[in-house]
Amino acid sequence: MKVGFIGAGNMAQAMLKNWIISNKLSSADIWISDPDAVKRDALVSEYGVTAVADNKTLIRGCNAVILAIKPNISDAVLDDIGASAVGKIILSIVTGLTTDALLRELPGAAVARIMPNTPALVGEGVIAFSRAHTLDEKTFAWASDLFSSLGRVYLVGENDMEAVTGVSGSGPAYAFIMIEAMADAGVRMGLPRALAYELAAQTLVGAGRMVLESERNPAALKDSVCSPGGTTIEAVYALEKGGFRAAVMDAVSVCALKAKALRDAQ
């Protein structure tokens, strides 16, 4: 199976690197197309993939194509490849680009709308497939297996994809800010910077695993750490007083609304 990437940004690079390392695909199976010649040459040098400057050349040479482009250029790219996509598998990770839009612009293609996130780089990503995909059973099984090497795969409703963007698609940025803030506080209290970052990062990793692997919900897990009159409940009070919970909810909401605006502009 030849797999091509239209767009070779950070997410595309995370995916192709993981698939090569995990032996899901060989370097010879991967093609890339990107207008940035320096980026193309760097990926060819580092991973041994095939690079082309023209999207039509890529789509003709591949069985499956991953759209990994910015939303603002999606119309132009879809116009460019539309006639060449007949009989091809098109997997789109473009924010706001709906399944209906893909089907309208790429008649004759089998399409899936997917929302991954950047922890896919370390095999801990969230990968959401829209249930509205038009892949047949065999092709979906192949795509699901391919993406499962990047993290956990979920099937969600088409109308939920923007909320997914707000929670997990952009969620790593929120986590990075929290790690940075926790580490800054650690440094303020005398910890070395490198140690503070490691303590904060590993704490979020461990807390996430507890949520995924425990039968208790996050509220119950939080309660179990908060002893009466103890240090943790004092810290939780400070977070609540500072509007932490509301700020996180606002961040997810505005992100999802922005994704909806991009969707509605299609």
Image (tube, rainbow, N blue to C red):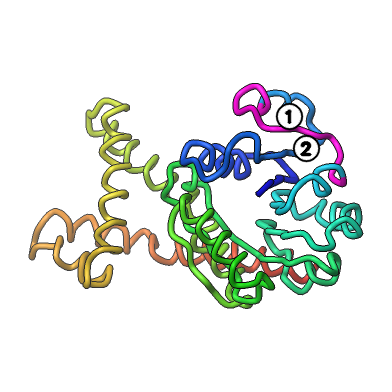
Q: Quadrant of residue 55?
A: top right
Name the image quarter holding the C terminus.
bottom right
Q: Is residue 79 positioned above or below 190 on the image?
A: below
Q: Is residue 124 positioned above or below 188 on the image?
A: below
Q: In the drawing, does residue 218 fall left or right of residue 128?
A: left
Is 35 or 56 nearer to us in this picture?
56
| Residue type, label 2 | Asp
Total count of labels: 2
**Farthest top residue?**
45
Q: Which x, y percent locates residue 209?
A: 28, 56
Is 91 or 139 nearer to us in this picture?
139
The residue sitting at 51% across, 41% down in the picture is: 18
Is 257 or 190 nearer to us in this picture?
257
Whether label 2 touches label 1, CB < 8 Å: yes
Q: Quadrant of residue 15?
A: top right
The residue sitting at 73% across, 38% down in the picture is: 32
Q: Give SS at disc 1.
A: helix
| Residue type, label 1 | Arg
Please tell me the numbered disc located at residue 171.
none
Reading the image, the residue beneath label 1 is 40
Q: In the drawing, does residue 80 fall left or right of residue 168?
A: right
Q: Give SS at disc 2.
A: loop
Q: Which x, y percent locates residue 196?
A: 28, 33
Q: Which x, y percent locates residue 85?
A: 83, 58
> Magenta residues?
43-56
- What's the distance in space between the residues labelled 2 and 1, CA to CA? 7 Å
Q: Which x, y percent locates residue 79?
A: 91, 57
Q: Is residue 162 positioned above or below 50 on the image?
A: below
Q: Check disc 2: other Cα within 10 Å, few if <14, some if 14-19, many if 20+.
A: many
Reading the image, the residue beneath label 2 is 34
The residue sitting at 31% across, 49% down in the picture is: 205
